[in-house]
Amino acid sequence: MVVRHGVPVTSWLQLKNYQHLLAFVFAIREINQNSKLLPNITFGFRITDNCYVGRMTYLSILQILSTRETISPNYKCDTQEKLLAIVGGLASKTSIQISNIMDIYKIPQLSYGSFDPSLGDKIQFPFFYRMVPNEDAQFRGIIQLLHHFAWKWIGLVAPDDDNGESFVLMLMSLLTKHGICIAFTQKVFATFSFIEIKGQLEEIESTFSQTKANVVVVYGDSHALITLTIWMDLKYQKAKWALIGKVWLLTANWDFTAMDSKGFWSLKPFHGALSFTIHTNDVPGFLDYLQTLNPQHPYGNFLFQKFCKDVWKSAHRISEMPFTMVQTKCTGEEQMKSLPGAVFEKSMSGHSYSTYNAVHVVGHALDEIYTSGSKDRVWRKKDRLQLLNMQQWELHRILRSIRFNNSAGDEVFFNENQESAAGYDIVNCIVFPNQSFTRVKVGRINPQGGQELIIKDDALVWNNWFNQMLPRSTCCESCHSGYIRKIQEGKPVCCYDCTPCPEGTISNQTDMDHCDKCSDEQHSNMERNQCIPKVIHFLSYEEPLGLVLAVSSLFLSFVTAFILATFVQHQDTPIVKANNRDITYILLGSLLLCFLCSFLFIGQPSKVTCLLRQTTFLVIFSVAVSSVLAKTITVVLAFQVTQPGSKMRKWLRKGVANSIILVSFLGELGICSVWLATNPPFPVLDMHSQSGQIIIQCDEGSFNMFYCALSYMAFLAMVSFLVAFLARNLPDSFNEAKFITFSMIIFCSVWVCFMPTYLSTKGKYMVAVEIFSILVSGAGLLGCIFIPKCYILILRPKQNSKKLLTRK
């Protein structure tokens, strides 16, 4: 039985491909030595080389389909070896070329390195099996990895071919969808022409020198991007600044080693790079197999001499030995274990692991056919067991449902698209000064698991430029909490300005696109990154303003009470009896209550205080103003009575003054009663007038009724002022009309200024304005009307006589 291997081995042999071959041979060796897997049946193989040329690929396939030296695929003789499966090729283009012929014969093809999404089309490629995962998982992994590290501004490098174009279009769509922007897209084409390489180097130089992107996603294998690797090596040796500050994010297509066999480039620029690789695991016995491999080994002679020259040439160069000392032939004493890791990596790479699994997939499929009742189709010839009339297409039914655990403990199977579901590893490339390197597995992309991306942040090693700090890659600096992003006009969404959140809103994370509004009970702090409770605000006794007003109210109340007591003490004197003593007591009592009602405005408003404060003040003040009006009318009537033949004496006897007070009082009381009955004042929380404050205040309920009651009091004051003004020149030493005129000027001035000031203030200051108006207007009445009389009563008692009162 023959399993033929289509591994492409270029004329400038890459050592990584040699490991693929060794993994292939090692897997066959394992199966042949396993007594439980295909017992008494031996695998055979052939290896062909296409040299990355399509014509050579077709020639190689036709050769392995022929049983003679001449190409005759359809010619069969009884001595032919039976081709059952193809393992290869590495490049997607090679796999497609192989499939074009193999599909005719329905021969299974197991590719260990082809990522082209078009190969998943089972109508066009029905017999193609992919040992590597679908690229969709790699695309999602790239997006998740960029999000994990908050890299929003990246560059793309891809080969200038159909695969590169497909990759760029697919990734650009996903990046845009997930809010990641592309700083540049650099296409690179593989060439060995010095003129073409020079032109590309200049283009790459210009791109990388201008970009601010610190993360570069590279798609394609080392052959397709040979110009890029040459440029990177030249820049690293001559001008490191072009590579400093870059995190290289490599896709699984680039299955790199430290140096190719010719020593064209080094991996030093890739120190700290992250690479997606096909999932691999430690295969028991593989390292021992490599350690003992030499030209004399039964499984080591294969192509060993062909690789020997380049292998040890690279080894000498890594050791910085003179080039003239390089041996050109192998002596037969060389061993793989003597090669440094910089020349030949001994841990199994992802592609080699896929090759290893591909061989075991075919072996397990044949074993299932052999053990499922088909032993009658096995015959012996020259001590070998061979399957009789085994057709290649019979393998497909088994391959599509194959499932087993390999020697490394991983489960091997195909999904519905005949692709491996193993996922990807994320490795961190660490390059040492002597060009040796190691791969550290730091994460995994597992499409079968619930959490696709698993990453070990503490295991990462970054480029020395970053000083082991997490690299940043953004178009702009992050907007800190308290700020939001504002997209710059005409630029990608990743380029923005940072603007602060307005009052009442916050942003408590970096790079937020909008500010979150605080609740009504909270407001934003100065940094705009936290909502804090608003301060409950009202005019309280604890604050200076409230304390000053309270003390002033109390002081004026004491003064009023003192004056009232003085007048009561001197109630029988002429100056007290003049202008109606009872009205004087009513006026002093109402002023005392006016000063005391100021305390209803200080302190936290409640339902009771809101109901009483305005109505109590207006009713009491209407009594005070009507008392002033009554006193003024009394003065006028008193002087009219003294004239001969006056008929006004009867009005004095009928208590006109008391009637004026009563009628005025009832008028104001009626207005306030209607107000309280229809739409009374009530306490409210004002959360928006003052920043950071919840103002507890009284809503007047009906501002129309409030202004109506206030207007009524103003009307009484204007009438009192007019009457007092007209009577100001009546001849008498105790004529109150002059003092009442001055008091009403003060009163009216205060309340005229009150309205615009009251309407232009908020919160506790509105309340303070009203208290101030009450105190000043009341003090004006008290001072202008009663202080002169108290002066006479207390300090000039001799002037308190009837003779002086009636002096003309």
Image (cartoon, helix red, strand yellow):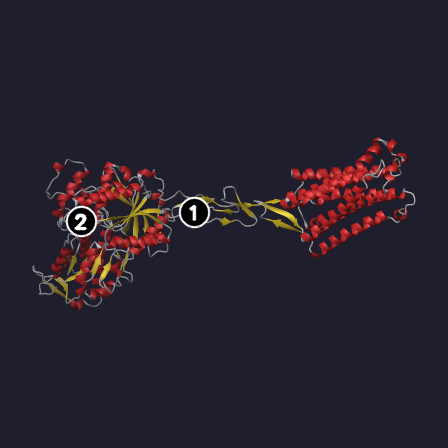
**Label 1 SS:** strand
The label nearer to you, 1 versus 2, is: 1
Q: In the rendering, at what x and y percent does residue 82 appear?
A: 13, 62
The crowding category of the residue bearing disc 2, from other C-alpha atoms within 10 Å (few below 14, some 14 to 19, many at least 20), is: some
> Does residue 597 appear anywhere in the picture?
yes
Q: Which mark is residue 549?
A: none
Whether residue 271 sits left or right of residue 478 in the image: it is left
Question: Label 1 is placed on what type of residue?
Answer: Lys
- Asked if labels 2 and 1 touch by Cβ distance under 8 angstroms, the answer is no
In the rendered view, does 306 fall on the left or right side of 288?
left
Q: Residue at x 81, y 41 (%)?
A: 727
Kindly tell me whether residue 345 is visible in this rendering: no
For residue 336, side relative to residue 602 (left or right):
left
Find the residue positioned furthest to the front: 645
Q: Is residue 668 above or below residue 105?
A: above
Task: Looking at the image, tell me whether mark 1 or mark 2 is earlier in sequence order.
Answer: 2
Task: Check the image and report above or below for 355 versus 264.
Answer: below
Q: Quadrant of residue 764?
A: top right
Residue marked by disc 2: 18
Residue 728 x/y as whole percent: 81, 39
Nearest the eye: 280 or 547: 547
719, 787: nearer the viewer: 719
Report the Cα–Cα distance between label 1 and label 2.
54 Å
Q: Secondary structure at mark 2?
A: helix
Quadrant holding the N terminus: bottom left
| 140 and 705: which is toward the camera | 705
Question: Please, what is the three-letter code of the amino acid marked with disc 2?
Answer: Tyr
Please tell me how crowded label 1 is: few (under 14), some (14-19), or many (20+) other residues with Cα within 10 Å: some
Residue closer to the observer: 459 or 29: 459
Residue 334 at x, y = what percent?
14, 43
Q: Quadrant of residue 124?
A: bottom left
Q: Which residue is mark 1?
A: 486
